[in-house]
Image: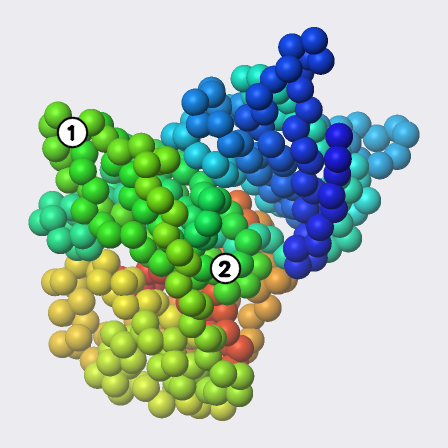
Amino acid sequence: MKVNLLRVGAALSVVVMSAALASAKPAAANVTRIHISACPKGISIQVVEEDLSLSAPRVSFNVQPSGPSASANLVGSTTSDVPGGIGRLFVYWNEVALAPGAQGDVVARGARNESYASFIVDTDCPPLGSVRGSAFEDLNRNGVRDPGEPGIGTASWKLTAGGDWFICGFVGGDSTFGPTVLPGTYSIIPVAQPGWLATTSPRTALVRQLGYASLNNDIGFVRAPGARGDVCGQYAPAPAPPQPLPPPAGQDAASALTAFGSFNTLLLAAEIAGISAIFGAPGPYTFLTPTDVAFDRVPSTTLNRLLNNPRQLATVLRSHIIPGVVDATAISARGRTFRTLSGRAVTLRVQNGVLYANQAIVGESAPTSNGVVFVIDRVLFVN
C-alpha cells in the first residue's frame, strides 16, 4: 500500500491507493483513494472511486485519540446514496473537539476492494469551504428562483472543477445542498430525477478561501411526467472559468461592496434610506451585507413597502451593522450575540462548519479600512 502525504493549506490530506480484498481473486479497483482533512474542530473524509458500474462503497470510521488509556471519540459509518460519480464526499464532522496529535484510521469497502487510510490530527487548521444552494420548482420556467417558488427534495446536483474530477449528490429534505470543498472555482450542474427536467444552466461558484461558502447557487426544475431523469456521469465536466480578483485591500466598505459587484440593491436601498454614508464612515464596523439574490428572495410586496418607507428601511439596514470588528474565527457552536446600530440583536454561531448570522449563512468576509464585510445570503429582520 502506497501512501502520499500532502499539505493543503494547514489541513492534512492523506491519499491512499486501493488494496484488493483477496489476493486469490484479483479485483478491479473501484475505491481508488481516500482524502482526509483532520483538524481539532473538524474532519472531512472523501472517498474517490472510478468504476461507475459498481455499487457505492461503504465507509467506516474509527478516530482513536492518542494515549494508551484513551477511548475512541469518533466512530461511524455511511453508505453513499449519490448517483454514479468519480469523486464522492462522504462525511464532514464539525466541532468534534479532536485532540491535536490524535491518530485515526478509515476503511472504505467497495464492491470488489477495500481502501485504508490513517491520519494524525493537525495542530490547527481552518475548516474547508463549501458550495451552498437549494433546488426549487421553477413554476415560470425561467431558470431563476422567484419569490413564492417552493423548494423540492427530489433533485440532484453535480459539482466539478473541470478535468475528470466531480462530486454528485442529492439535496436534503429541506431542498438544500452544501458539499465541502477546497478553495477554487467550480461548476454546478443540476441533475433531474425521474419525472423532472432541469431549467437552470450550469452555474459558477467561487470559494475564495478556507472556511468561506459560495452562496445562492439555486438550481431549478419543472415537473415532466414520463421524463426518465438525468445521469450524473453523462455530463462532461465543464472547464473552470478564471477566478475574479477579491476587492483590493485598504478600501472602505462602500468601495469594497462596489468592487464585489453583487450588492447593487443594498447600495441603492442605503441611498433611499439616507444612510449610505455609514459604509464610508471611520467605524470600525462589521457590515452584514445581503447579496442581490438575497434581496430577490424578499417578497415583492415587502420590499416595495420598505423602499417606500425610508425610515423603516433605515432601521432594517442599520440592523445589519455591528459596532466594532467581529472575529469570525472566535465564533463557536455556542454562538455570540451582538447589538446592532438599530438596537436589534444578531447572533453569530457555527453549525456544521458554516457560520450563521441569525438564520443567514455567512459566505465570506473581506477586511476593509473601516471594519469588515460579512456577505450573507438573506435579508435580516424582514417579515
Amino acid at the residue labelled 1: Ala
Badge 1: few (under 14), some or many (20 or more) residues near its Cα, within 10 Å? few
Where is the C terminus found, in terms of image quarters?
bottom left
Residue 167 visible to an observer of this rendering: yes
| Residue at the (35%, 82%) spot, across then down | 258
Image location of residue 328, percent across then percent down: 57, 64
Q: Total marks drawn?
A: 2
> Disc 1 designates what residue?
227
| Residue at the extreme right of the image, as rendered | 68
Residue extending farthest top: 24
Residue 75, visible in the rendered structure: no
Q: Mark 1 or mark 2, which has the lower sequence index?
A: 2
- Amino acid tagged 2: Gly
Residue under the image location 77 percent in, 42 percent down: 120
Q: Residue 306: image x %, image y %?
A: 19, 71
Left or right, 378 with reference to 206? left
Q: Which percent across, then down, holds residue 317? A: 32, 74
Mark 2 surroundings within 10 Å by alpha-carbon count, few (fewer than 14), some (14 through 19), many (20 or more): some
Task: Report the disc number at residue 74.
Answer: none
Asked which secondary structure carries label 2, the reply is strand
Image quarter (top left, top right, bottom left or bottom right) of the N terminus: top right
Residue 259, compared with residue 233, is above or below; it is below
Residue matched to label 2: 184
Residue drawn 88% across the image and 34% down it: 67
The CA span between labels 1 and 2 is 34 Å
| In front of the other: 237 or 76 | 237
Query: What's the residue at 46%, 79% (across, down)?
Result: 247
Q: Is residue 114 above or below residue 45?
A: above
Q: Position of residue 90 (x, y in %)?
A: 53, 34
Q: Quadrant of residue 319?
A: bottom left
Left/right of residue 71 with respect to residue 108 in the rendered view: right
Considering depth in this image, is 35 or 30 the residue closer to the camera?
30
